Image: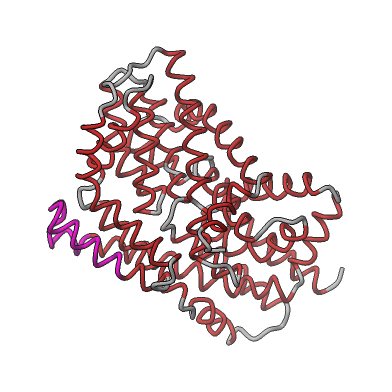
C-alpha cells in the first residue's frame, strides 16, 4: 500500500469515525487533518497558515452580515406579518394553514436564509396555531421543518456565499437568482403533498380570498420584503458587491426591527448580536479547518480519484447524476451543511461538470440535498429543532415527514435533470 493511500485512509477514516462518535464537526475536521499531515511528514507549522488562508476572502465577509441580518429580522417582529401575508394568498385552500406555513417559509427564508431560524421562529407560531385548528401535531411539525428548506434556496443564503467561495469563479448574484425557481418548485411540491393529505384527513379551509385583505397585508409586510430587494437587486444589478449589500441590509434590518415594527429593543439587539457571534464562530472555525482539510485532499489527489471512481462506475450521465445525489444525501444524514459544502465541493464539482452540470446548477443541487439531510437522523438539526418546538417525539415526526420526503426528492430530481429550473432566471436577468 502506497504512502499516499495510507494517508488518504487516515484522513478520511479518522474523519468519519469521529463523525460517527459524535465529535463536534470542527474537531473532527481539525484532528483528521493533523493526523494526515503527520502521516505525510508535513510540518504542523503550516496548519495555522492554511487555516488563515481559508478565511482570508473578501467574499466571506458577507457571511457574518447575512447571519446578523437574519437574526435581527427573525427576532424583530416580522414573522407574524409574513404569516398574515401568506394567509391572504393561500389560506382559502383545503389545508389552508399548511399552505400558509409553506408560503410563509418562502418569504421568511428570503430574509433569514436559515432553515433552523425558519423552524424556530415560524414553528413556534404556526405549529400551535395549526393544532388549535384541528391539524395533527406531527403533520404540522412535518410541514414546518420541510418547508424551512426553502430558505436555504431563496436568497440571501449565506450557504450560497460559502459555496461560491469554495467553487471558485461562481457569481454570488447568479446563485442568488438561481435559487428562486427551485425554492418555488419545492414549495409547490410540498403544497401538493399537503393538499392530498389535507383532503384525505379532512383538514379545514380558511377564509375566502380577498384582494383587499391581500393588499393590506402586503403593505404591512413591505418593509420586511424590501430587505430581499436590497440584497438581490443590488448584487445582480451590479450596484454593490454581496458583502456591501449584506452590510447595508444589516443596517436596514436594524432600522426596521427597532423603529418600524418595534419588535426589538436595544437590549434585544445586543442579545441578537450575541447569537450572531455564537453562530459565526462555528461557521468561521469550520471554514478555517476545512481549508486545511481541503489542502490535504488536493495533495493526496482525492478529487481526481473520486471523479475516476464515480465516472468509472458508469459513463451514463443519468447514473452519474443519481450517484452524486446519493452521495450528497448520505453525507447530509451525518454532517451539517457548511462542512459538506466546504469538503465535498472540490471533490464532486469536477465530476458534475464532466457530465454537463453547470456549477450554479450543482450548487442548487448540493444545497437542497444538504437541506434534506437536515431533516434526517442521526444529525438532522432542523428535525431536532422542530421536534423540540412542537414537543413531539422525533420518531413520530419522522413518520409524518415521510410523504414530504417524496415531494422533496421529486423536486430534487427535477432540479438535477432540468437545468432550466436553476439557470433560466440568472440568464434572463443577465446575472449569468
Q: Is residue 213 magenta?
A: no
The residue sitting at 41% across, 30% down in the picture is 393
Instruction: Give the quarter of the image for residue 253.
Output: bottom left
The residue sitting at 68% across, 84% down in the picture is 42
353 and 327: which is toward the camera? 353
325 shown above or below 174:
above
**Quadrant location of the N terminus in the rendered image:** bottom right
142 and 432: which is toward the camera? 432
103 shown above or below 329:
above
182 shown above or below 395:
below
Percent x, y of residue 316: 83, 47
The residue sitting at 32% across, 32% down in the picture is 89
- The colouring scheme, among rainbow, by chain, secondary structure or one colour, is secondary structure
Q: Is residue 258 magenta?
A: yes
Percent x, y of residue 37: 67, 77
70 and 155: which is toward the camera? 155
Q: Main secondary structure of the magenta part?
A: helix
- Counting the numbered discs, the total is 0
Instruction: Tell me the magenta residue range.
Output: 248-271
**Quadrant location of the C terminus in the rendered image:** bottom right
The residue sitting at 48% across, 29% down in the picture is 395
Instruction: Give the quarter of the image for residue 87.
Output: top left
Percent x, y of residue 183: 49, 45
Percent x, y of residue 96: 34, 24
Amino acid at each position: 500500500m502506497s504512502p499516499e493511500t495510507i494517508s488518504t485512509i487516515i484522513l478520511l477514516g479518522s474523519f468519519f469515525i469521529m463523525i460517527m462518535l459524535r465529535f463536534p464537526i470542527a474537531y473532527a475536521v481539525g484532528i483528521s487533518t493533523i493526523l494526515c499531515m503527520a502521516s505525510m511528514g508535513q510540518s504542523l507549522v503550516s496548519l495555522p497558515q492554511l487555516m488563515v488562508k481559508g478565511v482570508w476572502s473578501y467574499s466571506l465577509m458577507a457571511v457574518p452580515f447575512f447571519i446578523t441580518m437574519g437574526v435581527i429580522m427573525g427576532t424583530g417582529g416580522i414573522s407574524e406579518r409574513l404569516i398574515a401575508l401568506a394567509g391572504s394568498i393561500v389560506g382559502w385552500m383545503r389545508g389552508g394553514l399548511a399552505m400558509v406555513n409553506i408560503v410563509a417559509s418562502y418569504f421568511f427564508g428570503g430574509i433569514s436564509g436559515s432553515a433552523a431560524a425558519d423552524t424556530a421562529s415560524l414553528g413556534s407560531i404556526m405549529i400551535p396555531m395549526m393544532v388549535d385548528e384541528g391539524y395533527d401535531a406531527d403533520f404540522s411539525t412535518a410541514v414546518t421543518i420541510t418547508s424551512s428548506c426553502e430558505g436555504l434556496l431563496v436568497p440571501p443564503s449565506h450557504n450560497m456565499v460559502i459555496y461560491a467561495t469554495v467553487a471558485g469563479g461562481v457569481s454570488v448574484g447568479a446563485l442568488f437568482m438561481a435559487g428562486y425557481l427551485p425554492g418555488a418548485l419545492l414549495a409547490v411540491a410540498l403544497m401538493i403533498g399537503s393538499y392530498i393529505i389535507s383532503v384525505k384527513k379532512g383538514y379545514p379551509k380558511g377564509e375566502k380570498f380577498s384582494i383587499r385583505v391581500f393588499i393590506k397585508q402586503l403593505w404591512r409586510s413591505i418593509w420586511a420584503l424590501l430587505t430581499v430587494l436590497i440584497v438581490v437587486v443590488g448584487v445582480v444589478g451590479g450596484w454593490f458587491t454581496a458583502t456591501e449589500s449584506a452590510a447595508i441590509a444589516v443596517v436596514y434590518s436594524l432600522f426596521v426591527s427597532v423603529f418600524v415594527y418595534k419588535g426589538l429593543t436595544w437590549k434585544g439587539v445586543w442579545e441578537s448580536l450575541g447569537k450572531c457571534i455564537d453562530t459565526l464562530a462555528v461557521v468561521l472555525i469550520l471554514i478555517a479547518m476545512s481549508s486545511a482539510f481541503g489542502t490535504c485532499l488536493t495533495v493526496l489527489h482525492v478529487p481526481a480519484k473520486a471523479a475516476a471512481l464515480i465516472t468509472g462506475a458508469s459513463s451514463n450521465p443519468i447514473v452519474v447524476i443519481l450517484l452524486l445525489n446519493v452521495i450528497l444525501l448520505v453525507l447530509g444524514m451525518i454532517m451539517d451543511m457548511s462542512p459538506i459544502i466546504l469538503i465535498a465541493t472540490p471533490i464532486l464539482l469536477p465530476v458534475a461538470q464532466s457530465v454537463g452540470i453547470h456549477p450554479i446548477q450543482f450548487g442548487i443541487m448540493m444545497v437542497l440535498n444538504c437541506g434534506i439531510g437536515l431533516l434526517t437522523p442521526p444529525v438532522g438539526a432542523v428535525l431536532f429543532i422542530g421536534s423540540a418546538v412542537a414537543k413531539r417525539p422525533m420518531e413520530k415526526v419522522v413518520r409524518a415527514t415521510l410523504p414530504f420526503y417524496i415531494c422533496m426528492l421529486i423536486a430534487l430530481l427535477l432540479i438535477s435533470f432540468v437545468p432550466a429550473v436553476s439557470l433560466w432566471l440568472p440568464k434572463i436577468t443577465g446575472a449569468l
